[in-house]
Image (cartoon, grey):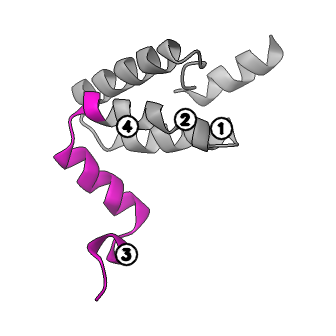
Amino acid sequence: MTKLVDALSLEEQLTLVARLTSPARLAQTFSAFVGQFYDRPAFDAFARQASDCYDPARARTFRAHLDRRLADRYHEPVVWELAETVERDAA
């Protein structure tokens, strides 16, 4: 039997998760798995996709909670704007 998750695209899965999960809880889950991504830009891109599934107020909450939880784990904050990547690389 096919699972629901197999029938949905990644975008649809993220939208569903955003509807069912609070921004703080999703940020907690993301921060727990940051070490599983060998490519940090891929993690940041995935976090941006998840953030885009929330309305603006809840997206700000997700971003703030995720950055704080990453800092607690001694990781850099997420690059939310792609222009930040250029600035970090230049430094």
User: In terms of secondary structure, what is the magenta stretch mainly?
Assistant: helix
**Segment tinted magenta in the rendering:** 1-25
Q: Which residue is mark 4?
A: 29
Q: Nearer the viewer, residue 85 or 71?
A: 71
Q: Position of residue 25 (x, y in %)?
A: 27, 33
Residue tagged 3: 6
Residue 22 lies, with reference to residue 19, above or below; the image says above
Q: CA distance from mark 3 to mark 2?
A: 23 Å
Q: Nearer the viewer, mark 4 or mark 3?
A: 4
Q: Are marks 1 and 2 in contact (CB under 8 Å)?
A: no
Placement of 64 over or under 51, stated as above or below:
above
According to the image, label 2 marks what residue?
34
Query: Which amino acid does the dot numbered 1 rest on?
Result: Pro
Instruction: Give me the C-alpha separation between circle 1 and circle 3.
Output: 25 Å
Label 1 SS: helix
Left or right of 24, for residue 72 = right
Q: Which residue is mark 1?
A: 41
The Cα atoms of the two marked residues, 4 and 2, are separated by 9 Å
Q: Quadrant of residue 55?
A: top left
Do the residues bearing badges 4 and 1 touch, measured as CB atoms within 8 Å? no
Residue 14 at x, y = what percent? 34, 53
Label 4, label 3: how far apart the Cα atoms are? 21 Å
